[in-house]
Amino acid sequence: MLSTYQEIRDRVYELCRKHELRPDWAADTKFGRVLFLYDVTQVIVARTFVPTQFIDQIKLAKLERDLAHLFGEGWLS
């Protein structure tokens, strides 16, 4: 499983290109970033929080669940 913010970000970008989605980092907080994913018609198809610090298995599991409907089960592995 990916474990750093940089690895997660790179995987998100890779999968967005593959699925023709546009990522938009909407807000930064002390512990992470809010991510919106848009489809080709500019409709938001997902919103999630991507941790940048203190990344643990609970946060990773939630992130994986939040985007599984777009990227498939196990996309973060």
Image (cartoon, rainbow, N blue to C red):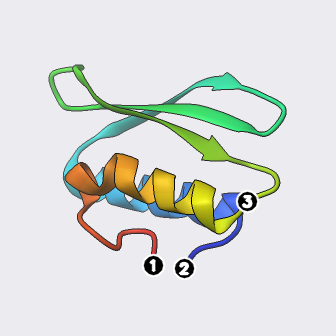
User: The disc labelled 3 sits on which kind of residue?
Assistant: Ile
Contact flag, marks 2 and 1 (Cβ < 8 Å):
yes
Q: Position of residue 38 (x, y in %)?
A: 30, 29
Q: Answer few, some or many: residues within 10 Å of disc 3's Cα (few below 14, many 20 plus, some between 14 and 19).
A: some
Q: Earlier in the sequence, mark 2 or mark 1?
A: 2
Q: Position of residue 47 (x, y in %)?
A: 41, 31
The answer to whether the residues at label 3 and label 2 have Cβ atoms under 8 Å apart is no
Location of residue 50 with respect to 23 vertically, above or below: below
Find disc 2 in the rendering and name its residue.
1
Q: Residue furthest left?
A: 41
- Residue beneath disc 1: 77
How far apart are the alpha carbons under marks 3 and 2?
Answer: 12 Å
The answer to which of 38 and 33 lies nearer the viewer is 33
Closest to the observer: 58 or 17? 58
- How far from the left and from the top, in percent, is residue 16? 34, 50
- Give the CA separation, mark 3 to mark 1: 15 Å
Q: Which mark is residue 55?
A: 3
